[in-house]
Amino acid sequence: MAIDWIGFGYAALLLFGGFMGFFRKGSIVSLAAGFTFGLLAAYGALRVSNNPKDIRISLIAALTLSVIMGLRYNRSRKLMPAGLLAVLSISMILKLLTNLLS
């Protein structure tokens, strides 16, 4: 059983980003989204750790975030946090698809 360190790191980044959005700007939406998607990504990373082909949960979280944050970046043209999170989510999607194909 290989641990999906990249997946758990992605989940931790989502949780941390949600907390930072709340503490710096008072955004309850950031806190809720960071908590929800962070836990979803952590659960997905746990599933991938147990079975590298079980990417469904992680893929749903990364796809959803890449679309939402990609649209936010397109509207605002601000790299932080929308652009960065969109790029990280797309990178996570590519990593998951690589797991599936190997």
Image (cartoon, rainbow, N blue to C red):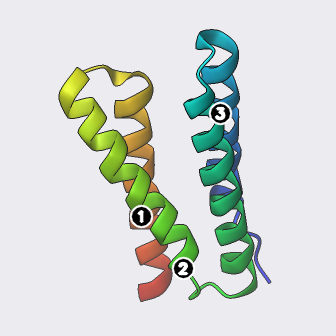
Whether 60 is drawn above or below 67: the answer is below
Circle 2 or circle 3, nearest the eye = 3
Badge 1 amino acid: Ile
Left or right: residue 88 compared with residue 39: left
Q: Secondary structure at mark 2?
A: loop
The answer to whether residue 45 is above or below residue 32 is below
Q: What number is the disc on residue 6?
A: none
Image quarter of residue 53? bottom right
Residue 31 image offset from top left, x and y in percent? 65, 33
Which comes before the other along the chain, label 1 or label 3?
Answer: 3
Amino acid type, callout 3: Leu
What residue is pinned by disc 1? 93
Secondary structure of the residue carrying tag 1 is helix
Residue beneath disc 3: 31
Q: Which residue is mark 2?
A: 55
Q: CA distance from mark 1 to mark 2?
A: 9 Å
Q: Which residue is situated farthest in the front direction here?
A: 28
Q: Which residue lies at the image location 39% right of the left edge and 65% below the top edge?
A: 94
